[in-house]
Amino acid sequence: MTRHSLRRTASLGLFAGPLLFSLGDLLRRLVTPSGNPSTSQLTDAVGDHVGMWLAAGLLSVVAAPLIVVGAIGLTVEARGRGGRTTTIGAGLVLAGAFASVGHAVAFYSPYALYARAGTPSSAMQSLDHASEGYPLLVVLIALFIVGMMLGSIVLLVGLRLARRVPVWSVVASVVFVIAGSSGGVAAGLLGVLAALAAFGPAARTLAHEGHPVSPGLESHAATLPG
């Protein structure tokens, strides 16, 4: 595979990974009852929407290797002004993407299994409470949050310093993080749009050999790389 093909593959991963991740999160929100649902309420909702819940989890898992490929592509191309910041951000995103697989399995599977097994409410609550302090899960969640959230912003700041993305992509990365940590379907939809606005231009510039962003990109939305 030529370097150009590798760059385009990384570009596609950088575009599709965050998009699929955000779509999976949106599906999760569509299933989750509003407010602060109890374990039994969430389990009942998952039991009523088995296919959608499974799709949400699968999208989150599939997104991870795509994000990894995209982040590696940016690391390889990082040089000059903004290169160090880009590399640090890409490294954080890499760690977050790897951790997101474990996080997805640990989050999506239990409620589906509770619903399938008809687990009593008291048992579900006990297992949920016990999981909150389990070291492996705590580490995965911490890596996931720091990597995917903080890493995304640092990465886009580095790309902006290198003039490889427009300034509104950095703003979109902040919106992406805020939407991801907020509740509700509206925040999930905003997260999808923010992912497109943040990572679309980054994927585009990676596909075009990392050339500095043109003035026209400052006022136009990004399109699928290619």
Image (spheres, rainbow, N blue to C red):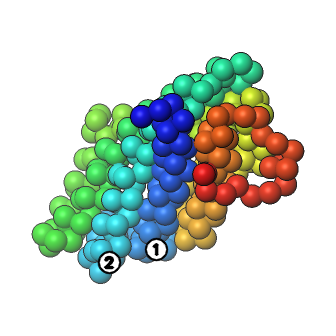
Is the residue 99 above or below the residue 16 in the image? above
Residue indicated by mark 2 = 49
Q: Residues within 10 Å of mark 1 (few under 14, many from 20)?
A: some
Could you say whether the residue bearing mark 2 is in a helix, strand or loop?
Answer: loop
Q: Residue furthest bottom?
A: 48
Disc 2 packing (10 Å; few <14; some 14–19; many ≥20): some
Identify the residue shown where x is 47% and y is 32%.
2
Residue 199 at x, y percent in the picture: 62, 48
What amino acid is labelled 2 in the image? His
* Residue at the disc numbered 1: 30
Q: Image quadrant for the N terminus?
A: top left
Compared to residue 211, the image places residue 218 above or below, namely below
The answer to which quarter of the image holds residue 107 is bottom left
| Residue at the image point whose x is 25% and y is 58% from the top | 109
Seen in the image, is 143 located left or right of residue 171? left
User: In percent of the image, x 80 and y 57: which residue is there?
Assistant: 220
Residue type of the residue flagged with mark 1: Leu
Is label 1 in contact with label 2 (beta carbons under 8 Å)?
A: yes
Picture quadrant where residue 65 is located: top left
Q: Is residue 218 left or right of residue 190?
A: right
Question: Quick one: SS at disc 1?
Answer: helix
Is residue 178 visible from the viewing direction of this image? no
Asked whether the viewer can see residue 109, the reply is yes
Judging depth in this view, the residue of 7 and 38 nearest the camera is 7
Name the residue nearer the viewer: 155 or 135.
Answer: 155
- 3 over 83 or under it: above or below: below
